[in-house]
């Protein structure tokens, strides 16, 4: 009865194609894993187009996140380098050395 209903329909649903694959009408490789059987099924063109759109959106999002991270990194480097110029290392070293000398003399 199901075959009679299918004769007049130009397109088959995804589930029906999967059932045909599982029943053995398509040549089947013995993979032993369901996910490989599912991925090796022929898909309709609408799934492929939809997947390509989703994949391109994901790639653009990942690229935007990477560029945002690089710009934040460069900004933090410029802030750190400007603060490093304000620090006078030799003056601090001499003050510490002088403080040690004073403490040793007090002992």
Image: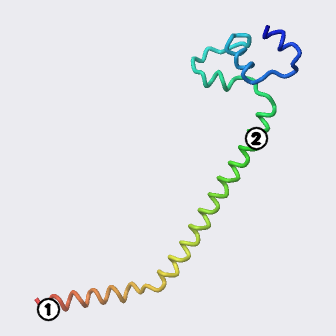
User: For the view shown, which residue lies furthest in the left direction?
Assistant: 107
Q: Residue at x 47, y 86 (%)?
A: 86
107 up-or-down from 27: above or below: below
The residue closer to the viewer here, 46 or 63, is 46
Quarter of the image for the C terminus: give it.
Answer: bottom left
The residue under label 2 is 52
Q: Residue at x 78, y 11 (%)?
A: 2
Give the image location of residue 70, x and y in percent.
60, 63
Give the image location of residue 102, x and y in percent.
19, 92
Helix, strand or loop status at disc 1: helix
Is 31 placed left or right of 95 in the picture? Answer: right
Mark 2 burial class by Cα count in 10 Å: few <14, some 14-19, many 20+: few
Give the image location of residue 4, x and y in percent.
84, 9
The residue closer to the viewer here, 11 or 54, is 11
The residue under label 1 is 105
Quarter of the image for the N terminus: give it.
Answer: top right
> For residue 26, which quarter of the picture?
top right
Query: In 3D space, how far apart are the residues under numbered discs 1 and 2 (Cα atoms)?
Result: 77 Å
> For residue 92, which quarter of the picture?
bottom left
The residue closer to the viewer here, 41 or 14, is 14
Mark found first going from the N terminus, 1 or 2: 2
């Amino acid at each position: 009865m199901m075959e009679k209903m299918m004769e007049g329909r130009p397109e088959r649903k995804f589930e029906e194609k999967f059932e045909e694959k599982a029943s053995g009408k398509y040549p089947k490789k013995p993979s032993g894993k369901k996910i490989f059987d599912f991925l090796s099924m022929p898909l309709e063109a609408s799934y492929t187009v939809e997947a390509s759109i989703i994949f391109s959106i994901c790639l653009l999002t990942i690229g935007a996140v990477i560029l945002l991270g690089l710009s934040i990194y460069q900004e933090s480097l410029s802030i750190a380098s400007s603060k490093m110029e304000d620090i006078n290392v030799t003056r601090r070293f001499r003050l510490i050395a002088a403080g040690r000398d004073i403490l040793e003399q007090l002992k």
